[in-house]
Image (cartoon, rainbow, N blue to C red):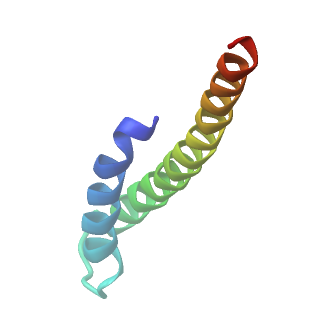
Amino acid sequence: MKNYTSQFLIVTLITGILGFTGLEFTGASVVRFIFLVSAIGLLISCLDSVLISKNMRKLRFRKLRNRVKNN
């Protein structure tokens, strides 16, 4: 999921600008809905990258600690 962070950011910015600048057009409600979906995807993607990187650091530390104990 963290591979899609930049794409979610771009889609969120573009749809946010189009949907919430006060322009009235027929697809404004659809653009606002796409903004909400992409913003949720961006939030999940960012949280995923933070949590996975934290877990990966723990795993690396455990492997390093096991190597030191074995030597």
Q: Nearer the viewer, residue 18 or 2?
A: 2
Residue depicted at 24% across the width and 66% down the height: 14
Q: Position of residue 9 (x, y in %)?
A: 34, 58
Residue depicted at 63% across the width and 43% down the height: 54
Q: Nearer the viewer, residue 25 or 55?
A: 55
Above/below status of 29 relative to 70: below
Q: Nearer the viewer, residue 51 or 10?
A: 51
Above/below status of 40 relative to 24: above
Q: Quadrant of the C terminus?
A: top right
Specify the quadrant of the image occupied by residue 24.
Answer: bottom left
Q: Position of residue 12 (x, y in %)?
A: 35, 61
User: Most extreme residue toward the top, as rendered?
Assistant: 70
Q: Nearer the viewer, residue 43 or 51?
A: 51
Left or right, 58 with reference to 44: right
Above/below status of 59 relative to 19: above
Above/below status of 34 relative to 19: above
Q: Position of residue 50 (x, y in %)?
A: 57, 49
Residue depicted at 40% across the width and 61% down the height: 35
Count of numbered marks: 0
